[in-house]
Amino acid sequence: MMELAREEGGIRQANTSLWRNRTFIGLFASYAVSLFGNMFHNIALNLWVLQTTGSAKQMSVIVISHLIVGVLFGSFAGTFADRIDRRALMMVSNLCRLVLVLGIAFVMTQPEVPFYVLVILTTLVAFAGVFHGPAFHSSLADIVDKEQIPQAIGIINIADNIIRVSGFALGGMAVALFGGVVAILIDAGAFLVSTLCLLAAGQFPRKMERSEGQKSSFIEDFREGFKVVWHNPYAKAGIILMPVLSCSFMSSFMIIQVMAVQVWHADGFVFGLIEASIPLGYLIGSIGIMSFSERLGRRGYWVIAGAVGMGPIFYLIAQVDSAAAALPLILIIGCLFAFSTLIINIMLRVEIDTAVQGRVFGILGSIIGVTPPVGIAICSAISDSYGPVTALTVSAIATLVVSVMVVAWIKPIRDYR
């Protein structure tokens, strides 16, 4: 991968501090602001649907529509991200969502508007958003130096967890104090500020992996994305292991929440501690990767430790009889999940040509959109029939067996340094 990069006005300087890299700061600020607004949006919309319709089924329609959009269009969005200016694509995505979110706020003020109008608007918001993810993820390797990628990913993931925790809390307060429409309008404002941050970032450089005269059609580029995933060992490793980890993590944590209520009889305070333990563990793991990234040695071993280690810890959680005993174990789960998934994200950005990263992340997003809901559905059925302890035990054993099989099969994970 060439370390030179085109930029209007010359060559991007190597080894620039991340906090002196205007492009990175603009991209990071844009992502953080839009994510913060999304937390307000999610709480306000879900609460409004439940209060207005009283139907969890109708709320699930919105969730399912978002899932379908991500699965169907993720790979197409990734191809667009590799063919056109990624910064421009993110700006267009933000502005489209700004207009659509304003439409949602208007619908929420009109009691006679049919529910399907809201479903259409939220589905369009999801469609516009599906182009933002691959463009954002594939831009990072262009705007920071190769050795700075672990630090950049660590910063983004730390901010991601802080924003999700604080955003949900502040979003709930905004809905309680000012109503759902105001919270939705805050999301619209966040998209505007996010776009301004991208403008302030300036043009994104593009690494010179593709020759000037080389042209290809959209269909050819789309097919190339699947070829990369199939033939590139690092892309294949990430595409297989990341969905496995996400499915296991989300399914098992959902069962832990059920256990907290049904088995441990946790009150609201303790339940909140359980919810906070995962992002706190993730933060600890992320900070560890940032601090010791150059001294981790064979990073593949840390991925293996995180992936294989989650199963036994989930099993131990299933055996404890109190929330207090489970809290440190849940914290460890957050750390293990951070080490495995963050290092895989670093690997994908370092080992795959930036010219095709949009397609890889688009395909990855489509798969991850499917596997966790399937795992949650299976674990929920087991929990309803045999109890949450049995469900978590089965999930733990399945996590261990599948992780060992995947790690044994995918050699690049074991050898990654």
Image (spheres, helix red, strand yellow):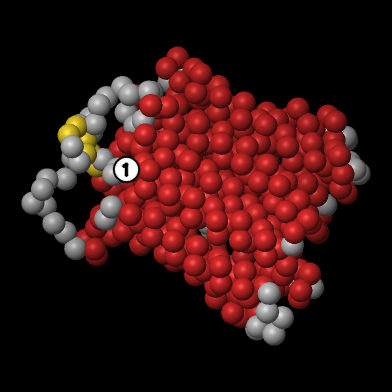
Q: Residue at x 44, y 31 (%)?
A: 152
Residue identifier under label 1: 202
Q: Residue furthest left?
A: 213
Q: Please tell me which residue lies in front, 60 or 145.
A: 145
* Residue pictured at 39% horizontal, 30% vertical: 149
Q: Position of residue 246 (x, y in %)?
A: 57, 46
Please name the amino acid that badge 1 sits on: Gly
Q: Position of residue 212 (x, y in %)?
A: 10, 48
Q: Nearer the viewer, residue 105 or 239?
A: 105
Q: Residue at x 65, y 83 (%)?
A: 113
Quadrant in which the C terminus is drawn: top left
Question: What x and y, as percent, mark residue 369?
Answer: 53, 56
Q: Quadrant of residue 117?
A: bottom right
**SS label for mark 1:** loop
Q: Residues within 10 Å of mark 1 (few under 14, many from 20)?
A: some
Look at the image and tell me in which quarter the N terminus lies. top left
